[in-house]
Image (cartoon, rainbow, N blue to C red):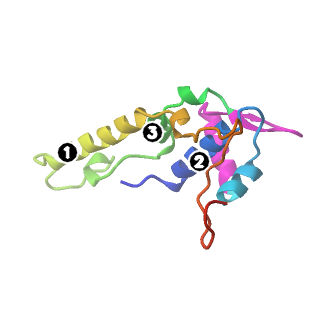
Amino acid sequence: MRLTTMTDYALRLLMYVAQHPDRLCTIAEVASAHAISETHLMKITQVLGQRGWLETVRGKGGGIRLARAPADIRVGAVVRDIEPDFYLVECLGLSDHCRISRACRLTGAIKGALESFLGHLDGYTLADLLPPPAGGEVAVDLPARPGRRGGP
């Protein structure tokens, strides 16, 4: 199974914003921190705002912040909300043309695996994904860039 880039970026966006609870974050700073297109992040921000995960503030001095506490945001719920579908095999989709669907036991096994996957993600909140604060400051734990050691 593979999550879409939109879901990956949505989770990164939520994690970044959660690490800065004392202020509004901007799309530009999140884009810069994660090397993601601002245009792509704008679309994701709009979706997360419409679905109640983010609050957006327009105008001068505007930005984004979480609409709920990080401990109240279940990772599995966000994934379910952002992913367009979970049709891991044709028979789970809307148009099933498989010749063995009626007698196939693979469908049940795949459904069970998907339920286990999402159930596992439900065991985590956004707060669980955040790095612990170092010295009282909120840390942004970005991967090291190629050719550099130890961090950004």
Using residue 66 as the reference point, say whether residue 131 is left or right of it. left
Residue at image position (54%, 35%) is: 126
Residue 80 image label: 3
User: Horizontal placement of 3 versus 117: left or right?
Assistant: right
Q: Secondary structure at mark 2?
A: helix
Report the amino acid beneath label 3. Answer: Arg
Q: Magenta stretch: residue 94 in it?
A: no
Pick whichever, 106 or 17, lies toward us. 17
Mark 2 or mark 3: whose residue is earlier in sequence: 2
Circle 1 residue: 109
Closer to the camera: disc 2 or disc 3?
2
Query: Hey, what amino acid is under mark 1?
Result: Ala
Q: Amino acid at mark 2?
A: Arg
Is residue 43 located in the magenta-colored stretch of the structure? yes
* Segment colored magenta: 40-65
**Residue at screen point 52% across, 55% down:** 5
Q: Position of residue 49 (x, y in %)?
A: 65, 36
Question: Looking at the image, is mark 2 or mark 1 nearer the viewer?
Answer: 2
Q: Is residue 61 left or right of residue 72?
A: right
The answer to which image quadrant residue 31 occupies is bottom right
Q: Nearer the viewer, residue 17 or 42?
A: 17
Residue linked to disc 2: 12
How far apart, in angstroms, are the residues tagged by discs 2 and 3?
A: 16 Å
